[in-house]
Amino acid sequence: MHTRGGGLRRPRPPSPGTLDELGFAFHPAGSVAGQEAAARALAAQMLAGELTPRELTFMIHQRFGHELPLAERLANLDDDYDVLKYGDRTQAQVDADVMAEALRLAQHSRVPTEPAELPT
């Protein structure tokens, strides 16, 4: 946005109430809901082919450790990748488990999906 003097002014971010009216979720920084939304978004990226199963588990484990219950299974699967050469599982088996968990995670939603009606 431009000011009267010609300089740029940053627009104010929308309020949580405005976002809610438009059907968007507002997650405060550092909130569990925000972390869960980020984990679901990463899972969706993997399902869309933008990340490999290994990359997904690594990113989840790096960002959340084993502290986010919704994504803990993916953190555990990252540990499984780390010990593949010592165990009896194959990478394809772990990849399949990651795919199944990513599908579950991407389908898990705490946010209503129907947008609020906008005034006309």
Image: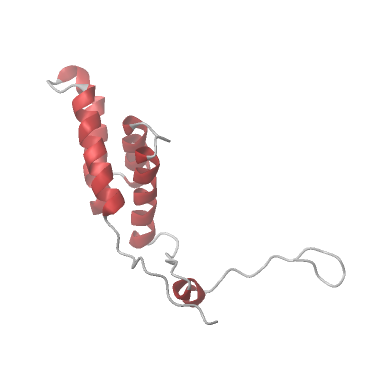
Asked if residue 72 is positioned above or below residue 21 in the image, the reply reads above
Q: Position of residue 103 (x, y in %)?
A: 26, 45
Please tell me which residue is depicted at 33% across the width and 55% down the height of the picture.
36
Left or right, residue 110 beside residue 119: left
Q: Residue at x 33, y 60 (%)?
A: 32
Which quadrant would the C terminus be assigned to in this image?
A: bottom right
Left or right, 113 with reference to 15: left
Q: Is residue 67 visible?
A: no
Q: Give the vertical position of 74 relative to 114 (above or below).
A: above
- Residue lying furthest front: 120
Tell me: residue 45, above or below residue 40. above
Which colouring convention does the figure follow? secondary structure
Q: Residue at x 23, y 23 (%)?
A: 91
Percent x, y for residue 27?
42, 64
Question: Where the N terminus falls, by quadrant?
Answer: bottom right
Q: Position of residue 52 (x, y in %)?
A: 36, 31
Query: Which of these two is toward me, 63 or 36?
Result: 36
Residue 112 visible here? yes
